[in-house]
Image (cartoon, grey):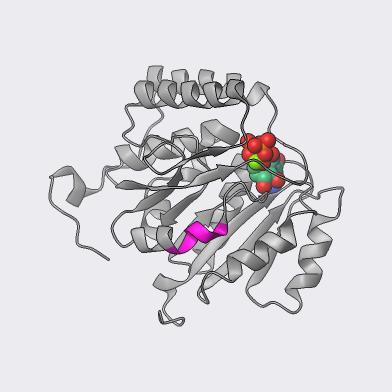
């Protein structure tokens, strides 16, 4: 059993929500069941369906469940950032992000946590051997494949799934890559994070997952987000944002010591 008193080992799973009342409590329960050291932060944007109220009342009897309620729909990217801020301020050692619609199955969390012994960032990936998507119509498969090829090539990323929102970040990464300057939301947020992590000299590893189509509730990401993400990737290549200095021990090619 990992020492719960050690900040380094505490794990926060951020669940951004907008109208996820049909999913949030069942998913939270499954996430918390994966390990004692996991806590959940739901970042809700004042969902009209009462998602936050459900979380608030459940948190009265579940001390590992926390709620951050924002005044209105402010976008997925800023929800991640609010969660990162909370995680860093409260001393968590590893911080995960997951969709709150069962597309990212909590059963992968233990394997991803284990992989964090080896990598600074771990991605639940659809596009490595063993990974995949379930019940997606072919146009959506094609679009996702193309979006990944496009971002991967232009941003010169090594990971195969650049738009995956199921990730675990070490505290050191979030403190070093300056994510709080990222203003984009949705997919482009995830692509820029991958770019920042890699360019700052941190390692990313992929764990295969089967991405399941949501069964309850409806999609919140607008289709315009896809075009915006494509433009944003291009802008990142043409006018790269300023980055913090590259991590020294990585830039000289030396192996990093396992945590
Ligand atoms: N707090 C917050 N959460 C959001 C916002 N937009 C989306 N989300 C949440 O982010 C997660 C991913 O959004 P989805 O609507 O599932 O997007 P998607 O996975 O690309 O689309 P589907 O495959 O159709 O479900 C879900 O948990 C949403 O509830 C937002 O503006 N604010
Ligand atoms: Mg989804």
Tell me what residue is drawn at x 80 percent, y 54 percent: 21
Q: Quadrant of residue 68?
A: bottom right
Q: Quadrant of ligand 1?
A: top right
Is residue 253 on the magenta stretch? no
Tell me what residue is drawn at x 74 percent, y 51 percent: 70
> What number of labels is visible?
0
Tell me what residue is drawn at x 64 percent, y 40 percent: 213
Does the magenta stretch mainly form a helix, a strand or a loop? helix
Q: Is residue 90 left or right of residue 169?
A: right
Q: Picture coordinates of residue 93 (x, y %)? A: 43, 66
- Residue toward you, 227 or 75: 227
Q: Vertically, is 232 above or below 55? A: above
Q: Vertically, is 186 above or below 28? A: above
Q: Is residue 74 left or right of residue 163?
A: right
Magenta range is 106-110
- Residue toward you, 241 or 105: 105
Q: Picture coordinates of residue 209 (x, y %)? A: 47, 47
Q: Vertically, is 216 above or below 2? A: above
* Image quadrant containing the N terminus: bottom left
Q: Can residue 185 be seen here?
A: no
* Image quadrant containing the C terminus: bottom left
Q: Quadrant of residue 151?
A: top left
Q: Vertically, is 36 above or below 186? A: below
Q: Picture coordinates of residue 50 (x, y %)? A: 85, 55
Q: Picture coordinates of residue 206 (x, y %)? A: 37, 46
- Residue toward you, 143 or 130: 130
Q: Can residue 147 be seen here?
A: yes
Tell me what residue is drawn at x 83 percent, y 62 percent: 53
């Amino acid at each position: 059993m990992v020492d719960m008193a050690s900040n380094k080992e505490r794990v926060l799973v951020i669940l951004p929500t907008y109208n996820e009342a049909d999913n949030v409590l069942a998913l939270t329960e499954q996430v918390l069941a994966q390990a004692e050291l996991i806590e959940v932060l739901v970042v809700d944007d004042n969902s009209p369906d009462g998602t936050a109220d459900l979380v608030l009342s459940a948190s009265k009897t579940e001390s590992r469940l926390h709620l951050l309620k924002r005044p209105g729909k402010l976008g997925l990217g800023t929800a991640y950032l609010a969660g990162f801020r909370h995680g860093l301020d409260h001393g968590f050692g590893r911080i995960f992000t997951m969709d709150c619609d069962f597309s990212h199955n909590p059963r992968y969390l233990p394997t991803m946590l284990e992989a964090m012994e080896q990598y600074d960032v771990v991605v639940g990936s659809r596009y490595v051997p063993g990974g995949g998507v379930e019940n997606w119509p072919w146009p959506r498969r094609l679009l996702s494949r193309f979006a990944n090829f496009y971002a991967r090539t232009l941003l010169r990323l090594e990971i195969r799934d650049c738009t995956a929102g199921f990730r675990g970040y070490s505290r050191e990464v979030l403190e070093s890559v300056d994510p709080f300057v990222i203003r984009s939301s949705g997919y482009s947020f995830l692509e820029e994070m991958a770019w920042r992590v890699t360019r700052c000299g941190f390692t990313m590893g992929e764990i295969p997952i089967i991405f399941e189509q949501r069964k309850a509730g409806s999609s919140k990401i607008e289709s315009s987000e896809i075009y915006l993400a494509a433009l944003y990737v291009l802008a990142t290549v043409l006018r790269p944002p300023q980055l913090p200095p590259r991590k020294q021990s990585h830039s000289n090619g030396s192996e990093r010591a396992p945590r």
